[in-house]
Image (cartoon, helix red, strand yellow):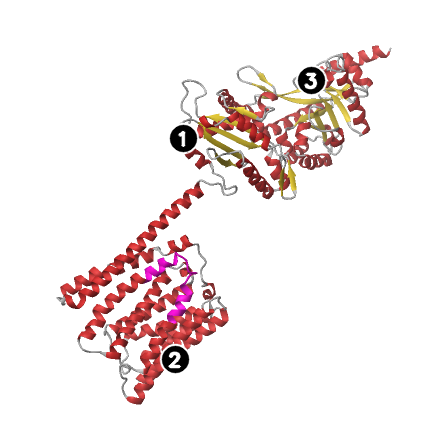
Amino acid sequence: MTAWWRWYAVLGAVGCAAYFVAPTTVWGQSVFVLVGASAVAATVIGTRMHRPRNRTAWLAIAAGTGLWVIGDIVYEWIHITRGSVPDPSLADAVYLVGYPVYGFGLFLLARHKWRASERGHVANSAIIMVAFGLLTWVFAVQPSLGDGGSSGIAGLVDVAYPAMDIFLLGLLAHFVGSRQWRALSYRLLTAAVLLLVITDTVNNFSMVTESSSERSLFDVGWTISYVLIGVAALHPSMRRITNPNIESDAHLMASFTTPTVVVLTAATLTAPVVMVIEVLREEPIAQWGWAVLLCAGALVILVIFRITDLLRLLHTQTVQLRAVADSDHLTGLANLRALEHRVWGNAGESTLLTVDIDRFKEINDTFGRGLGDRVLVAVAERLRGVADDSILLARLAGDEFALCGPSESMDPAALAREIQNRFTTPFAVGNTTLLIEASVGVASTSPAVEGADETTPDRLVQHADLAVQAAKATQSRIAFYDRSMDRNKSEQLIMLGELNTALESDQLRLHYQPQVDLTSMRIVGVEALLRWHHPDGSVLSPSAFLPTAERTGLIRPLTSYVLTHALAQRGRWMAEGLELSIAVNISTRNLFDDTLIEQVSAALQQFDCPPGRLTLEVTESSAMTDPAGAIETLSILHAMGVQVAIDDYGTGYSSLAYIERLPVQELKIDKTFIGGMAHNSAHAAIVRSTVELARTLGLSVTAEGVEDEVTMMTLRELRCSRAQGYHLGRPTSADRLPALVAEIDDRLNTATGERIS
């Protein structure tokens, strides 16, 4: 079916050729009528086959075309029966009725639902109709009337044909300005109308002889126009030509396309062109001057109307684009660009409060980004209640909001406290109720130190960001910017670069702290502790550089370094006859890193280490950050046979009952409680109850921070599994560890033997 339009196009071309090679005029006119009738049939068939939404439009086009075919038949019948065709004739009546019917179908295809923007296309059509009407009247109709050629009804008919062509040409302008121009069927139909108008115009200007006894090359215009109508109706794209539903301003812009502007420019120039031609021909101005004057006036009015429309459109779109450029699409708040404009626009000092939602990533990871977006909208609504008319509320990026206003009318401390109060009420989002916390950073364009440079909008935002990062570490969750934060930030960036160099230049070292089995009183394992031997001669512990690494992707290669070097060293000790378990610390970011499982598995395989000899230590707070995610990761590690320990137990906010749900095998009691056992009864009670409950749950317990023999023996009496601390052995380098193990084992066994004896 889809190839029918191609076959019809070929047959139509054959029909056009047959019209000129037919042996007699009667045969030629019969072919002409047959081509026209086939166009009517093709239009009806195409409408039924493709079922477009605007069937009425296509059927109207078929009806108009059918009337012209009937007109051709009537014309030829009169010519055959009478020998000549009078002017006017019944055929003219049928032809002229066909034009408005055909034009009505074209209008239904091109029209839009009537809006104010529709007037632009109507004005375009009017400009072209006025210009073409002027040309037709001055060069075709008026000379004919002036020569006494036609009068009465015949004169009206002679005027009616150009008027109908002007009407079709106006619709053609409407076609070219339409967004439907992309459809091939639409372009074919446009070409058909254009050929029809051109051929009619050539005949109106008496450039060919209108006689059924002569066939002119210009007659091919009517024939091809018929064929193009049929091809357009049979082409599948005709079903996509529907009444477009375009926004007003977008529709108005469609009436200013490049083809339309070119056509309108040419049409506007017709009045002066006609005047020049008539003056050069020395035609009496009384005959044509009034027509040029009227049309020129009408064109000026229409062009002014179009320019006014264009200016209104440009103003509207400028306002809309500015609003879009300055707005956040999700919350409808202002964005960073609008915030910068506000800061630049304030004559005095500006104060900026940055509000950052704490642990928003966990909301996205747990509930999905859809609910996360709804949380952002809910936060925006709650913050609207804090900001008054003098304060601009904006969403900067992600989960970061900002409130900006003139410093003289703001109390930033009170405003920050009010924001915190707003977050004390849980957020009901869909079927979920969430308790959300936020940190607030405050900065101002006023120099923090006398003599400092003026603060620009981007610097103000940067200062507020530094303050909000500092706020996350305070109990009040509110912080005010000061210049020391800049120094801290720059120091972190410098450290990050140096740390990257340290990884590549072997500045990192692993030290190992022995872990003693309190039952056998022998060293059974070590904890690998990372140290950075800085080029300046200092030795930095992980607390000095790991927080910086955790905020970047550098934590991943650091963890890989520790894993591979620790397991490689264990293999070397095994070759020397010293078998020890290895404990390695992993950070929060490692715990939720998709590559952790792969890193551990590859390291175990590379160094032929039994999984049970590797213990991964995670802090209590890390595991509680996202319990569901932690359980998933730790379960995979447990299934691999790797031991998992909760480090610094007791310093977080979880309960032992909750720890039971985590796939862990060991608890490491924080040294804060171990060191205070001797003189703090509460600490002693906590350690005792933790050991007993952990043993009941089948977990082993390691005590950190054992600094004296009394504490060690007390832990042994409590049946604590393991211990580590300075009393048992300080962290040492890998090459010195075997000697240290032998020394400690001998000392502990001697001390234990003496106590027993």
Span shown in magenta: 102-125
Quarter of the image where one finds residue 269: bottom left
Residue 747 appears in view: no
Is 261 one of the magenta-colored residues?
no
Q: Secondary structure at mark 2?
A: helix
Amino acid on which disc 2 is placed: Leu
10 Å neighbourhood of mark 1: few (<14), some, or many (≥20)? few
Q: Which residue is mark 3?
A: 737
Q: Amino acid at mark 1?
A: Asn
Rendered-image quadrant of the C terminus: top right
Identify the residue under disc 2.
Answer: 34
Q: Residue at x 32, y 66 (%)?
A: 169
Determine whether 679 is above or below 11 in the image.
above
Label 3 SS: helix
Measure the C-alpha gap from mark 3 to mark 1.
66 Å
Mark 1 or 2, which is nearer the eye? Answer: 1
The mark lying in front, picked from 3 and 1, is 1
The question of residue 105 being in magenta is answered with: yes
Residue furthest to the right in view is 757
Callout 3 amino acid = Leu
Q: Is residue 480 above or below residue 44?
A: above
